[in-house]
Image (tube, grey):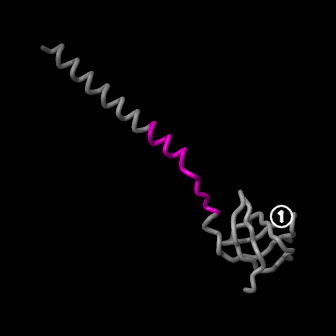
């Protein structure tokens, strides 16, 4: 009789282990399928200033929320000018001159 209980306990343990492993695998697969969200997206619409000149085809440096970021723009923007973040391209911020 003791042997029967041992097999039942072992079977329950195996079922629990298989279910847990399946849950982990499904969770990992789901996380890989999701599009990554970058914290950079939170900067769109924020204002900052130019630390190093930004020109078309030449990235510069801007400060937004007290952090330095590489920035690109369609127009030349001199040091000290106010900018508005209008988009994110990779790890670079796309900015335009701001009136404020």
Q: Main secondary structure of the magenta part?
A: helix
User: Where 12 sits versus 74, above or below?
Assistant: above
Location of residue 6 in the rendering, given as x and y in whole percent from the top left corner: 21, 18
In the rendered image, residue 36, in percent from the top left (x then y), is placed at 58, 53
Q: Where the N terminus falls, by quadrant?
A: top left
Q: Residues within 10 Å of mark 1 (few under 14, many from 20)?
A: some
Residue 63: x and y, percent? Answer: 74, 71
**Tag 1 residue:** 59
* Figure check: 10 above or below 32: above
Q: Give the residue drawn at x 69%, y 64%.
A: 88
Task: Give the total of numbered labels.
Answer: 1
Work out whether residue 32 or residue 13 is closer to the camera in this orientation and state it: 32
**Quarter of image, res 45:** bottom right
The residue at the far left in this view is 1
Residue at 49% in and 41% down: 28
Viewer-closest of 20 and 49: 20
Q: Is residue 60 magenta?
A: no
Quadrant of residue 59 within the rendered picture: bottom right
Left or right of 16? Residue 22 is right
Horizontal relation, residue 92 to residue 56: left or right: left
Disc 1 secondary structure class:
loop
Tell me residue 67's x, y (percent): 70, 67
**Residue drawn where x is 37% and y is 35% of the image:** 20
User: Quadrant of the image for the C terminus?
Assistant: bottom right
77 versus 6 height, above or below:
below
Side (left or right) of 79 relative to 37: right
* Residue range (magenta): 25-40
């Amino acid at each position: 009789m003791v042997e029967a209980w041992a097999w039942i306990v072992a079977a329950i343990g195996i079922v629990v282990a298989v279910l847990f492993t399946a849950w982990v695998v499904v969770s990992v697969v789901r996380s890989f399928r999701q599009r990554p969200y970058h914290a950079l997206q939170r900067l769109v619409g924020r204002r900052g200033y130019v630390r190093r000149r930004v020109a078309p085809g030449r990235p510069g440096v801007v400060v937004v929320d007290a952090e330095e970021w590489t920035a690109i723009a369609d127009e030349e923007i001199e040091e000290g000018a106010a900018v508005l973040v209008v988009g994110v391209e990779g790890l670079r911020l796309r900015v335009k001159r701001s009136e404020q």
